[in-house]
Image (cartoon, rainbow, N blue to C red):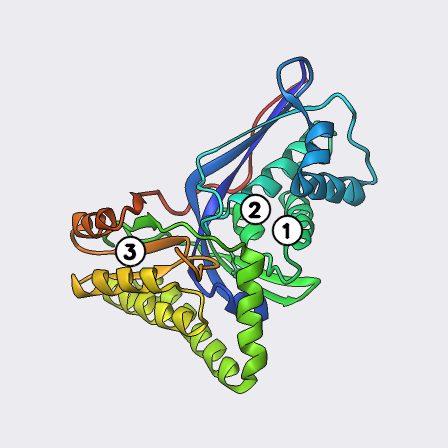
Amino acid sequence: MKKVTVSAPGKLHLSGEHAVVYGKPALVVATSLRLYTTLETGAGATLLRKMRKNDRYIEAISAAFEKKYGASIKDDVGITITSSIPIGSGMGSSSALAVSLSGALCVWHGMPWNPQAVNDIAYQAEKTIYKGSSGSDPAVSTHGGILWYRKELEFLKTLWLLPFKIPKTFAPFVLINTGRKESTGDLVAHVGEGKKRDEKKFAVLLDAVEKVTKQTAQSIHDEDEKGFRRSISENEQYLEEMGIVSAPVRAFIRAVEEAGGVAKISGAGGIQTGSGVVVAIHDTAQKIIALAKKRKYETFQVVLGGEGVKMEQATA
Ligand code: MEV
């Protein structure tokens, strides 16, 4: 029985989310949470052909693969997807799906293993969900590690895999899932409307975000935890100015700050209820966990700097 499994990681934006849509850099890190796509022949799995009909995103990924390689996917391919990445929370679950499925399709069809091609397919698919995608999510899911990413032009994206890790001396990050109602596309559009209302103010905000993204990278490089925490806090203020942090999440972040920690949303955010995943740091992680528990938010910890897209198995 022919069987192919390819996995891809979720991500966190340490800095630069939304600003990256407008050509500013983002600092993104792959996590240890992964999504696995298995393609196989034989009974048991749902047919990809069927899934393509019912799921626009699966269709977009499959069609982007077919377009890139001028191939057509055979009728008898079965598909199974398993994932530990929370869905719709800013942790890159949809990009991980696009990256792992396009990787699996490439292996299934005997294409050479080419992460850049996998990334291109995933990026094309992501743009069918929201046009303005910067491509930072598929890029970090493809390449892993800590990525400095910038979309200069539609056809020119610069990415630099930072040759260092989050220092072990830094207190571990606590992640809090605050949930959210809006899609990434809604939130990107919301920020776009704010930009249109006051272009001058937005340009100043974008420059400030770029500066803090550089400070964040510098502080990781210098193993300067104080500077890193300052950058996280400053970054959160700018995200709040963009209007994509909900009132309850702002209140939660203020409570973390009052308790002596720092926190920021990570990813697209959220306006009505929750704002997706929040990254929080405190010398005593338990303090954050207690504050989150009070609000019935789920907390978890992940290892940062995970491996990018990976061929897990391929049997002919
Ligand atoms: C979403 O994970 C990150 C955003 O910056 C959108 C994008 O980069 O395409 C909000």
Q: Is residue 29 left or right of residue 264?
A: right
Q: Amino acid at mark 1?
A: Glu
Residue picked out by circle 1? 126
Distance, label 3 to label 1, CA atoms, is 28 Å
Q: Residue at x 20, y 49 (%)?
A: 285
176 vs 19, nearest the viewer: 176
Quadrant for the N terminus in the image: top right
Q: Secondary structure at mark 2?
A: helix
168 vs 254, nearest the viewer: 254
Q: Residue at x 30, y 47 (%)?
A: 297
Q: Which mark is residue 189?
A: none
For label 1, being within 8 Å of ligand 1 is answered yes
Q: Position of residue 45 (x, y in %)?
A: 62, 20
275 vs 305, nearest the viewer: 275
Q: Secondary structure at mark 1?
A: helix
Q: Secondary structure at mark 3?
A: strand
- Above-or-below relation of 195 to 48: below
Residue picked out by circle 2? 95
**Mark toward the start of the polypeptide (3 vs 1):** 1
Q: Are marks 2 and 3 in contact (CB under 8 Å)?
A: no
- Above-or-below relation of 120 to 196: above
Q: Amino acid at mark 2?
A: Ser
Residue 253 position by quadrant: bottom left
Q: Is residue 302 left or right of residue 3?
A: left
Q: Amino acid at mark 3?
A: Ala
**Mark toward the start of the polypeptide (1 vs 2):** 2
For label 2, being within 8 Å of ligand 1 is answered yes
Q: Is residue 188 left or right of residue 215?
A: right
- Above-or-below relation of 27 to 175: below
Q: Position of residue 146 (x, y in %)?
A: 44, 53
Residue picked out by circle 3? 280
Q: Residue furthest bottom?
A: 200
